[in-house]
């Protein structure tokens, strides 16, 4: 079945990339694998911290950070742009919290102790039935969690609350489809770019010089916008 097989990276905006790199390396043991000027931008930095490498059929997984000139002037407010904790809201479309995985209860407890040994307060573990979790904060009010499913199977019906289902307006037919997505057979040729359609997600706030590139051919996009080697300075970016 054609589907994604994991998270390659989750990118978080930052005004202090070094603080995040230091935290994720020292506190959580993530390995810095890339740090470079982000091509196609004006002075943006990009970095990748590896959470696990490709092994045993699993893809590599990373957390990434992006820093740009002037980011420190953009307001950051708990309860609006940042949740601040797992019980609080943030504006729609923003990251409420970010959980990384370990496989066993022993590893979960060891991660709790590692994080505490770095002076960071940790709550947990808590048992949620389908997983166990510990909770803590990262730089710039990021809300973080280490989670383990402990090999438990949550594919049954017990974790689908019919009250929540009704509140969200999900019919039984829709629920069955969500739980068993249809397979997709790729045609012999590429699918052409669809036109802009009401209600469909689209990149917002793109610079004018890049907005038109969405209607270029796939070949033209690959040829003109690719940057297979990291830039060495801002001008090259």
Image (tube, grey):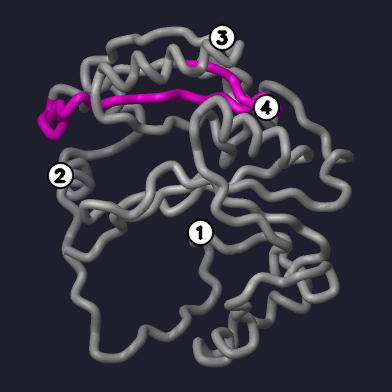
Which image quadrant for residue 237?
bottom right
**198 left or right, relative to 2:** right
Q: CA distance from mark 2 to mark 3?
A: 41 Å
Q: CA distance from mark 4 to mark 2?
A: 40 Å
Q: CA distance from mark 4 to mark 1?
A: 35 Å
Residue 51, x across and y down, in percent: 44, 42
Q: Which residue is mark 4?
A: 139
- Residue 24 is at least partly visible in this image: yes
Residue 80, x across and y down, in percent: 69, 28
Q: Find residue 199 and name its label.
A: 1
Q: Residues within 10 Å of mark 4 (few under 14, many from 20)?
A: some
At 58% from the left and 16% from the top, the residue drawn is 118
**61 left or right, relative to 183:** right
Q: Residues within 10 Å of mark 1 (few under 14, many from 20)?
A: few
Q: Which residue is mark 3?
A: 121
- Disc 1, SS: loop
């Amino acid at each position: 079945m054609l589907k994604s097989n994991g998270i390659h990276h989750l990118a978080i905006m930052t005004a202090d990339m070094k603080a995040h790199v230091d935290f994720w390396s020292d506190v959580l043991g993530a390995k810095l694998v890339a740090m470079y000027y982000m091509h196609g931008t004006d002075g943006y930095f990009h970095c990748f911290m590896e959470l696990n490498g490709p092994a045993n059929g699993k893809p590599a997984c990373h957390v990434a950070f992006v820093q740009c000139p002037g980011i420190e002037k953009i307001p950051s407010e708990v309860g609006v742009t940042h949740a601040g904790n797992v019980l609080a809201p943030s504006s729609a479309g923003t990251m409420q919290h970010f959980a990384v995985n370990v496989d066993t209860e022993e590893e979960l407890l060891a991660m709790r102790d590692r994080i505490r040994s770095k002076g960071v307060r940790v709550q947990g573990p808590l048992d949620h039935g389908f997983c166990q979790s510990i909770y803590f904060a990262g730089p710039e009010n990021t809300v973080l969690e280490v989670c383990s499913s402990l090999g438990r199977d949550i594919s049954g019906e017990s974790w689908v609350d019919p009250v929540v289902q009704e509140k969200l307006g999900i019919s039984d037919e829709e629920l069955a489809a969500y739980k068993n997505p249809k397979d997709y057979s790729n045609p012999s040729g590429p699918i052409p770019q669809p036109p802009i359609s009401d209600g469909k997600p689209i990149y917002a706030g793109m610079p004018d010089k890049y907005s038109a590139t969405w209607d270029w051919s796939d070949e033209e996009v690959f040829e003109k916008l690719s940057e297979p080697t990291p830039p060495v300075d801002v001008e090259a970016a």
